[in-house]
Amino acid sequence: MKMDRAALTAFLARDFAQVAAQFAVESVEGGRLVLRLRVAEMHLRPGGTVSGPAMFGLADVAIYLAILSEIGAVAQAVTTGASIDFLRRPEAGADLLAETRLLKLGRRLAVGEALLFSEGQAAPVARASMTYSIPPGAAQGAAPA
Amino acid sequence: MKMDRAALTAFLARDFAQVAAQFAVESVEGGRLVLRLRVAEMHLRPGGTVSGPAMFGLADVAIYLAILSEIGAVAQAVTTGASIDFLRRPEAGADLLAETRLLKLGRRLAVGEALLFSEGQAAPVARASMTYSIPPGAAQGAAPA
Amino acid sequence: MKMDRAALTAFLARDFAQVAAQFAVESVEGGRLVLRLRVAEMHLRPGGTVSGPAMFGLADVAIYLAILSEIGAVAQAVTTGASIDFLRRPEAGADLLAETRLLKLGRRLAVGEALLFSEGQAAPVARASMTYSIPPGAAQGAAPA
Amino acid sequence: MKMDRAALTAFLARDFAQVAAQFAVESVEGGRLVLRLRVAEMHLRPGGTVSGPAMFGLADVAIYLAILSEIGAVAQAVTTGASIDFLRRPEAGADLLAETRLLKLGRRLAVGEALLFSEGQAAPVARASMTYSIPPGAAQGAAPA
């Protein structure tokens, strides 16, 4: 592991200052990271449910941080593609938790996925997979854990 | 066409009050809708580029409104799945425009896609396709234009 | 569980006679199914690697059978959408195994995912997620295992 | 244009000998290519409809050839990700036609999409988007047409 929970939290605060306060890194180990979205008014749609873009953003930040935990701080990795399935309506008034799994850490591309849950619920509210382009020379081609 | 530009604008203001001010329906005709994202500080990432979640949200709202333009106001249609490719970095300081195309308007599922552009640029910054579940009895199975 | 390994194998032979001989259900339990693709000349691309369409087909059949194992034989469920990431080149000369996980078993839509492996390898060669439309009256809305 | 219809047809016959006879390049111009799938028994599912993997393969070959038409013969470009929506049941007994559009031709990644039609029908049976990794030094970063 190149970056632990404290290092990722510091990275988030420095490089993603606009959104850092919305998130909390709960745990990270072997590419498996749990990220909390502190659900607030700005994330909600009519009826009190969390919006699709807020869920997309949670998955994106979670998988991105999981990759950094393995390859180190690479500020210029960019999301090149994503797919997301919305499975159930999130619980009103509950935070969302994203749980990641890394599938590929190549020299040029990294791929990870996340399941999103309303806190305290067993059934996922969404599934996402995301691909990131790694700038030349940045990654070590480490095998995913 | 069941809802024109004025009707969609009113729908957006009433049913999506939290985000309506960020968007403007530029035109709509035969399922082809152009939606503007008025890019502001809240949509930006470091470097002044528009964030992934903001682009995802633009595509989602644009395709959703394009579907409503054909089947009428159905507040309970929900996004069930989406895929998005990020193609180029958006221009700093420019609004984004989404141009939609409807591919299927079934009784149960509707599918559409959007290309996103920085205003004034010819090359798209992103491509998205989205699937919506239509509540029973809401849609007319009209053929996409 | 509505259909066990023997029932799924019989279903495959009867309803998918064209392709049944290519596959073998290795195990199934709680929506987690392992399906083998008996790799043959017809699945290969230049260099001896398994083709993309063959991997797509393996994931599709595996997730479909996993859904049937939970809701029973529904011959008219149709794939409505899919996303797939190709992660590594499959091993030449090795069968492929798909391992599924069900994410949603609703009345109208079912969603599952699969990881694909070259037999004997720990790192996945592909990841796929697929959505199926369930005909009215067919499913029981059972919670995914 | 680096490769015209004749050059692409020769490439297909040489580098994809296993599947070349199933396809015919109908036209190509500015990254817009039309590829025919000569539907035969091997592509069918029960009921006489074209299978999902056959449609996936058609889209993959079509977009791949469209990219080669712009950047020249690059045998080692590999598909890294794809999403596909199945929109309608293909017509029994009709060939399928894929119509492509290129969205990005970068130094490292190329992205294209395709609509698939049953010959003679106006409504698409499927939509697909695909991403390809371009080997270093192979592409020219030409702008998509």
Image (spheres, coloured by chain):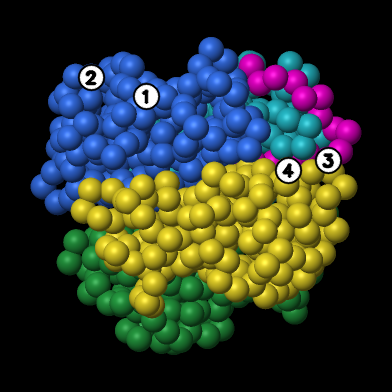
Chain colours: A green, B cyan, C yellow, D blue
Residue A91 is at least partly visible in this image = no
Q: Secondary structure at mark 1?
A: strand
Of callouts 2 and 1, the N-terminal one: 2
- Neighbor class of circle 2 (other Cα within 10 Å; few <14, some 14-19, many 20+) is some
Residue located beneath label 2 in the image: D5
- Count the numbered circles shown: 4
Residue at image position (28%, 48%) is: C45
Label 4 chain ID: C
**Circle 4 residue:** C76
User: Which residue was labeled with disc 1?
Assistant: D35
Residue ID for mark 3:
B135
Q: Is residue C134 left or right of residue B19?
A: right
- Could you say where residue C90 lies in the image, as x and y percent from the top left? 32, 62
Along the line of sight, the residue nearer the viewer: A37 or C135: C135
Disc 3 versus disc 1: distance between alpha carbons?
A: 37 Å
**Kind of residue sitting beneath label 3:** Pro
Q: Are marks 3 and 4 on the same chain?
A: no
Tell me if mark 4 has few (under 14), some (14-19) or many (20+) residues whose alpha carbon lies within 10 angstroms of its own: few
Tell me how far mark 2 sits from mark 1, CA to CA: 10 Å
Q: Nearer the viewer, mark 4 or mark 2?
A: 4
Circles 4 and 2, Cβ within 8 Å, touching? The answer is no
Q: Classify 10 Å Cα crowding around label 3: few (below 14), some (14-19), many (20 and above).
A: some
In the rendering, at what x and y percent does residue B45 appear?
43, 56
Magenta span of residues = B130-145
Callout 1, which amino acid? Leu
The CA span between labels 1 and 4 is: 29 Å
Whole-number angstrom distance, CA of label 3 to CA of label 4: 21 Å
Identify the residue at horizontal 73%, vertical 30% (top origin).
B106
